[in-house]
Amino acid sequence: MLKNIRTDLAVECLTETGPSLPPGVRRDTETIGQTPVTRVVIETEQAAQTIGKPVGKYVTVETTPFHRFTSDFENQVKIVGDEIKNLLPDGPALVVGLGNSAITPDALGPEVINLIFATRHLQKDFAAISGFEHLRGAAAIAPGVLGQTGIETAEIISAIVQEIKPKAVVVIDALASREIARLGATVQISDTGIAPGSGVANHRKELTEKSLGVPVIAVGVPTVVDMNTIAEDLSDGQPVSLPEKGKNMMVTPREIDTIIENAAKTVAFGINLALQPSLSLSDVISLVN
Amino acid sequence: MLKNIRTDLAVECLTETGPSLPPGVRRDTETIGQTPVTRVVIETEQAAQTIGKPVGKYVTVETTPFHRFTSDFENQVKIVGDEIKNLLPDGPALVVGLGNSAITPDALGPEVINLIFATRHLQKDFAAISGFEHLRGAAAIAPGVLGQTGIETAEIISAIVQEIKPKAVVVIDALASREIARLGATVQISDTGIAPGSGVANHRKELTEKSLGVPVIAVGVPTVVDMNTIAEDLSDGQPVSLPEKGKNMMVTPREIDTIIENAAKTVAFGINLALQPSLSLSDVISLVN
Amino acid sequence: MLKNIRTDLAVECLTETGPSLPPGVRRDTETIGQTPVTRVVIETEQAAQTIGKPVGKYVTVETTPFHRFTSDFENQVKIVGDEIKNLLPDGPALVVGLGNSAITPDALGPEVINLIFATRHLQKDFAAISGFEHLRGAAAIAPGVLGQTGIETAEIISAIVQEIKPKAVVVIDALASREIARLGATVQISDTGIAPGSGVANHRKELTEKSLGVPVIAVGVPTVVDMNTIAEDLSDGQPVSLPEKGKNMMVTPREIDTIIENAAKTVAFGINLALQPSLSLSDVISLVN
Amino acid sequence: MLKNIRTDLAVECLTETGPSLPPGVRRDTETIGQTPVTRVVIETEQAAQTIGKPVGKYVTVETTPFHRFTSDFENQVKIVGDEIKNLLPDGPALVVGLGNSAITPDALGPEVINLIFATRHLQKDFAAISGFEHLRGAAAIAPGVLGQTGIETAEIISAIVQEIKPKAVVVIDALASREIARLGATVQISDTGIAPGSGVANHRKELTEKSLGVPVIAVGVPTVVDMNTIAEDLSDGQPVSLPEKGKNMMVTPREIDTIIENAAKTVAFGINLALQPSLSLSDVISLVN
């Protein structure tokens, strides 16, 4: 029963369905350096129904927990960058950071946007002055959340996509996971975009190729678990009576400030590398600081 | 000669033209409580050329300096709210906070947006639940600056205006003043919108009724003075040799963090009162915190 | 069995010992306005052993959850202020904010210090200028944590107490609770100071009347629960196998930024009212902003 | 006449006294890589009177302006580290960050403290676990300012020095300069400590070898200029009538947030290298993040 379990991670949905994979699903895991990378492909609509995620590709990079220092930082950024590049079509891109910058565990998107190297507006003489050539056009925006703006995020993004006509959109968002241990320790990359309430067709709210007209790559890091999930998980599926006040609570690690800071660097630098393959990581770091 | 003097304040432009007003300009000053309010009207294109500001109405509210506590806070918010309301047409409005949230003296716009009560998305049952009725539709966005987004701000706003079709736009921005003493001590409200490089028709960059199709009210607070202005001002117009490094420097008061915080409250609460006349100031404060 | 249950709240320790109170413990609850206030007195060393908290008085104020707006804010501040005043001796006081300002759920202490009205240094003419008379000497410091400073907090505070010789110390700290529902919804005030690892005499680490030579009032708000506690709690005491990575994790609500901001205001304004009974709440707010 | 000119930089005081050096003063400039380093020695009390700075050594490192990215960052950190090391005696050290963290141009000290690698408390097994050996004992504190704490900073530091008995103190503070062009573009290192109102013996307020009993190295970066200085400077010494409101204003560059962030990194990493010569810069960066 998945009813009370909320997760945005395809790998966690798979675990729920039992030890063997359902038909129409492929999964393989590769370890790059010290970093496990799992690629899941949901190939059929029926598999999508079973698993509760849309048809598409989902890559999970298991990073060092983002609240700890790692000497492997550079490699992890490159893995994230490579996986995004594999899913990203050529041409100008719009990077969108979802979430509320005033709530730390929800601030991944806005923090990533602060570290994206926007190039769409650069004049022709920039290459001559800086020495950086062959840059792909990149735009970046953190539109805020519905409660702040009064406007559905999908409406804002749709309007901007029509205005600047990118060839692809990259959407960043903080995710919910089922397992506490995955919080701040995983990056998920998919080519499915973001569709709240999967299965329900609500085009006003989704950011997908269907709604925007161009491919949408979604990149996320789990930063919260909801209390119902923890309760279900710990009780081996037995009914659990959560106190009323705790029912809709989301929990997040104590080190969430550091997690968001480091996760934003890993994701943003990875996106910059994917968008601008002619730049090195140290070019990227110097350009966005 | 205004050449080296940069100011966004109409009242300062007037001072430059000498003791008597040029033809086509009206100015009167009223003191409300302890707060001087100056209203300037530029009535003709010729006056606009002379003064260097577009035809329209400009209201200057001389507040207590925003880095000091004032027991007159509530009155000043109400004055700002009333002056905005006088210029603002009825109907749904979009509030736009210009500027870069990462540079404190430029962060007025984004900070105001954090304090705007967005209502456009509220469901019909909100009035019943909250007791707040007859709310005007309000949306709010801080789009970031060109260097961060790669997109002209005017393009973003124009796209959103077409999408959500408000009846008016309110634009907030940090301003440059000529006099150090005005920094963080004045709110300017005008019905002219914002047009960088006045006189030059650059519709891609301006936020005006002409470019957006609806009235645009601009609200700003001076937070910087440029060094050339200080130099000119102190030397009584004599030629001044600024050191090369200082030439393009903008200066700002040491207490800029407090100034931005308090100016954002005054402007945002004033806008909320102008948009929602049925709310009291304490309603507004409770709704946005 | 209390072994795996970590809580800093005396009321929660009592619940653990069963439905009836152990000998040597008194507890009564009063509702002030809408706010339940529970006062626990641990009277004997034997009761202290049973309960796991030192002999002394513990007051728990059950506030509106700090991430929600409440029109009852003013009353709650006054209740917190009155309860602190009841425990606080006369004379100059030192207010100490424990915790790490860089980790939001641990930042309660430093945030409170930012809102304390320090008066110890005010010159004699301050009363004449401001109109505020009969102010008690108050000093305030947020010393940082051992990992940042390399110095035991108790060493720093002890040195300052010897230097400025206050008649009382008020210590603020973020607390751990057992119940998720109490996070950000309770203020605990006690006259026992703070002694990590109760029962173990470690004077270098404790902030108590014994170690500092003056009464120490402790004020705290629960902001984290540890995962072991959640696991124990949800499994009705059955053995639980937590995943290795989750074992030492602390969890905190998603709205922790707002909780800390509002909790700091309630605690700090309450302390200011307790220290300076001649001031009104609006005096206090104006003096610390 | 120095009367209206306020500067904390010894090199700027020298300029004031005319083209030739006064007796008892030595000055030489060396360019290390691309970075000019000026060393001034004030050798006699008479020279100290003439110049308005105490007897001692003053090193000025002219860095790339801290609001710009520089590929020379690593070299500049090493120069700052080497100059501090030259003045710093052996043995355990206490690093003190002066200033108010809530006022950006005054926040250099607290920001540096956030990046100091505190080692005094590390257990013997740290070397075995981390591989970092032969670490010098380092403690670090940002005590806040008198207006926040109610306690003279010198009292707090004196109490802590007596408690932990370091062999040297390093004090970091934001400075005032005379020239706008020096703001955020210079690090001054001296062996004189910090004595407000030089010439006046006020031991309660100074942080010097005389007051603390151990050598005090002062490290600072100019972040503000006062308006009187700007006025005097631009008017070639002619009398200037500043508007009343501007008279006591301090001005600071618009990019002050970035300046403080990068200046804090340069100073803090330099201090860490000076304290722990066995560490590389990348060790330092990984240890403090």
Image: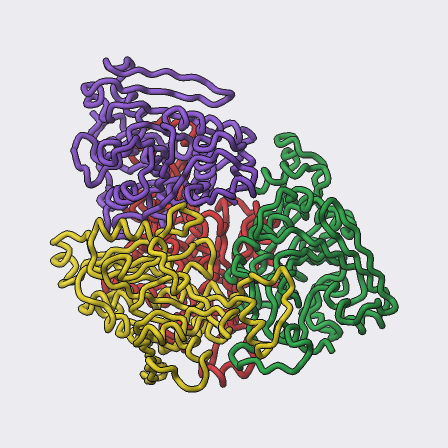
Chain colours: A red, B green, C purple, D yellow
> In the rendered image of this protein, does residue C233 appear above or below residue D145?
above
Identified at 38% across, 39% down, the residue is A5
In screen coordinates, is B267 left or right of C131?
A: right
Residue B249 pos. (x, y %) = 55, 73
What is the x, y in percent for residue A175? 41, 49
Residue C261 falls left or right of residue B180: left
Q: Residue A160, image x and y in percent?
A: 60, 62
> Eyeballing the image, is C129 above or below A118?
above
Query: Could one spot residue A29 in this view of the protein?
Result: no
Residue at coordinates 39% horizontally, 84% vertically from top-left?
D21
Tally of numbered discs:
0
Q: Is residue C269 above or below residue B79?
A: above
The part of the image, by quadrant, that contains residue A285 is bottom left
Quadrant of the rendered image containing residue C18:
top left
Observer able to see residue B239: yes
Write the residue at 75% across / 71% down. B16
Q: Quadrant of the C terminus of chain D?
A: bottom left
Q: From what the image shows, is residue C103 above or below residue C271?
A: below
Residue ID at (40%, 31%) = A246
D10 and A253: which is toward the camera: D10
Nearest the viewer among B59 and B134 is B59
Q: Residue furthest front?
A: D46
Residue at the right extreme? B23
Q: Nearer the viewer, residue C73 or A173?
A: C73
- List x then y, in percent, for residue A44: 42, 53
